[in-house]
Image (cartoon, helix red, strand yellow):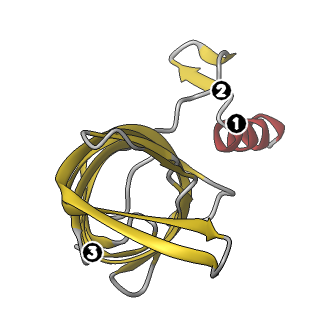
Amino acid sequence: MTIVGFMIVSVASGYAQIQSDGIHIKRPLAIAPSPTYKSAIGVRAGSTAGITFKHFIAGEGAVEGIIGVWRNAVRLTVVYEKHVPFGGVAGLNWYYGGGGHVSIYSEDRIHHWHWDPPEGWHRHDHAHPGSFGIGVDGILGIEYKIPPIPFAVSLDLKPFIEFTSGNYVFWSFDPGLGIKFAF
């Protein structure tokens, strides 16, 4: 009974390898994480807000695309994410990765304040023809695929830096909240 108990505890803890000539203690058994869904579509709220689509391509690796539309811009962001199980809870993963984005602006609108002694402070708006931007993005977050229903909720930081053809540089830590329909 002691040998059976040892085998159950050892195998359950992932530190035993059973061979025909007995039990040998070796390196930990690798337990590959597996996503609880293949693809998901939804929305992300944050600086990079928009419609998002995620697809797992290899084991724990996923590609996520975000299309955002604002009053004067459109942005396409693509990041590669590696998902890792978190806390031993089914469907709960943390993820990290990186990628990039492209932005197209219909116009550059610059706001600045100017001091005019007789009248005081004035806000000046200058509009310039459209420009485009390219940027580098990182991502670090946590996601929970709710087991009984086909929805996933995520919370992440997606820091980015963007360089535009209008000679501007934008950066943000870009926290975001995502809700996706998983299938």
* Residue 158 seen anywhere in this rendered image of the structure: yes
Give the residue displayed 62% in from the left and 17% down from the top: 22
- Residue 7: mark in rendering: 1
- Residue 70: mark in rendering: 3
Mark 1 vs mark 2, CA separation in Å: 8 Å
Q: Earlier in the sequence, mark 1 or mark 3?
A: 1
Disc 3 vs disc 2: Cβ atoms closer than 8 Å? no
Mark 3 vs mark 2, CA separation in Å: 56 Å
Looking at the image, which is closer to me, 50 or 90?
A: 50
| Circle 3: element type | loop
Which one is closest to the eye, mark 1 or mark 3?
Answer: 3
| Circle 1: element type | helix
Read off the residue under disc 2: 16
Q: Position of residue 166 (x, y in %)?
A: 28, 43
Residue type indicated by callout 1: Met
Q: Where the C terminus falls, by quadrant?
A: bottom left
Which one is closest to the eye, mark 1 or mark 2?
Answer: 2
Give the residue displayed 66% in from the left and 78% down from the top: 118
Looking at the image, which is closer to me, 43 or 112?
A: 112
Give the residue displayed 64% in from the left and 25% down from the top: 28
